[in-house]
Image: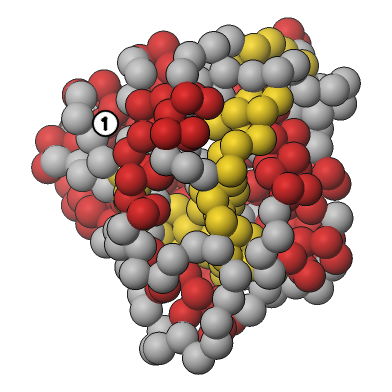
Amino acid sequence: MRIILFLIFWLIGWVYYKSLRFLKKEGEISGEYKVSVIIPARNEEKNLDKLLYLLQKQTYKPYEVIVVNDNSEDNTEEVAKRYGVKVVSLYEDPPEGWVGKNWAIWNGYLESRGEILLFLDADVEPREEFIEVMLSNYEKYGGLISCWPYQRFEKFYEHLNLGFNLVSVFSMTLFGKKEGAFGPSMMISREYYEKVGGHKEVRDKVVEDLHFGNLCIKKGVPVNNFLGGEYIKFRMYPKGLKDLIQGFTKNIAKGAFSISLLNFLLVFLYITGVYGSIFYFRSTVLNFLYALYATQLFAIQRRLGDYKWYDAFFYPLHFLFFFSIFLYSIIRIFFVKAVIWKGRKIRVG
């Protein structure tokens, strides 16, 4: 009976896999748009230097680029000024009730003048056609367009994000049903942004992209989420293993308990199947399930990042790491009620 259940859970993974959509160009752009690129940046001098250079190379030039220096302790502001972009300087921590990124984005919006807002995390690496492709999707679908970048790795520890990457993407898919948005890259019109109340409405949310996407859906704004594929990449936590652990601790438990019940159950069942294939100790069944899940994860991971064959083969290590950080995240979120991120203590509840 258990093997049948694990096979059903395995099939859920393939349905999710088929539901994933890549960002692609949807024809030529028919209009002319003033695009305001807004980049919240705290201690992002290295990433920002690369991003601002890539924005200069865009085939569709933005109307303005706004970097919000969120009380950085490095040379973030100096790097931004070197590129001649508009810099909004925040020299104090966010007001009570605001999370840092949301406060930075909101201040960037207040200084913007474009009719289209493009929010980018400082660590993304857009290809030169990226803005053009995003606008082509905006013309086709309208509303909010969000994109999850393809993972680029330079160090071995970065591969440990496989479980988190997979769960993050699956949580926003739900077999075609819209839920949440991908925070690293979001495009929306000023009109719609103001209609939903912007990031002020999700000011205290740690997983702001999930809540902002759901806010748009609730307010009747269309939401379409895509995988970045060839058009946008990033290194999620390039500063070290500690950075990766803190980042996922901040997001994973809060995000898991913020998605819809149906989506939570489906993702939970799929992950149950993954762990079942690891811990089911009847050798012939174990080998069969292991091969099925390893093959499936190999197919899925190729859509998500620069993972290697051994990431799929040794997937138990990835998911045991995922489980340990998930438990730690639950402790931090629901018992300690505080997480640490970029040198700040963020209170959550």
Q: Which amino acid does label 1 sit on?
A: His
For the point 58% across and 43% down, which residue is it?
86
Please say whether residue 285 is visible from this viewpoint: no
Please say whether residue 180 is visible from this viewpoint: yes
Question: How far across and down, in percent of the image, does residue 340 sit?
Answer: 61, 12
For the point 44% across and 66% down, which residue is it?
61
Q: How is the image coloured?
A: secondary structure
Residue nearest the viewer, comparing 211 with 125: 125
Question: How far across and down, in percent of the image, does residue 344 sit?
Answer: 64, 12
Residue nearest the viewer, comparing 106 with 256: 106
Question: How far across and down, in percent of the image, does residue 264 sit?
Answer: 63, 47
Decide: is 95 above or below 36: above
Viewport quadrant of the C terminus: top right
Decide: is 238 above or below 306: above
Disc 1 marks which residue? 159
Q: Quadrant of residue 156?
A: top left
Query: Would you say 321 lies left or right of 288 here?
Result: right
Decide: is 186 above or below 207: below
Tag count in the figure? 1
For the point 19% across and 30% down, which residue is it?
154
Q: Is mark 1 on a helix, strand or loop?
A: helix
Query: Would you say 258 lies left or right of 172 here?
Result: right
Question: How far across and down, in percent of the image, does residue 279 sit?
Answer: 33, 28
Q: How crowded is mark 1: few (under 14 residues within 10 Å), some or many (20 or more)?
A: some
For the point 29% across and 27% down, which residue is it?
158
Q: Quadrant of residue 273?
A: top left
Query: Would you say 158 lies left or right of 138 here?
Result: left
Residue nearest the viewer, comparing 30 with 288: 30
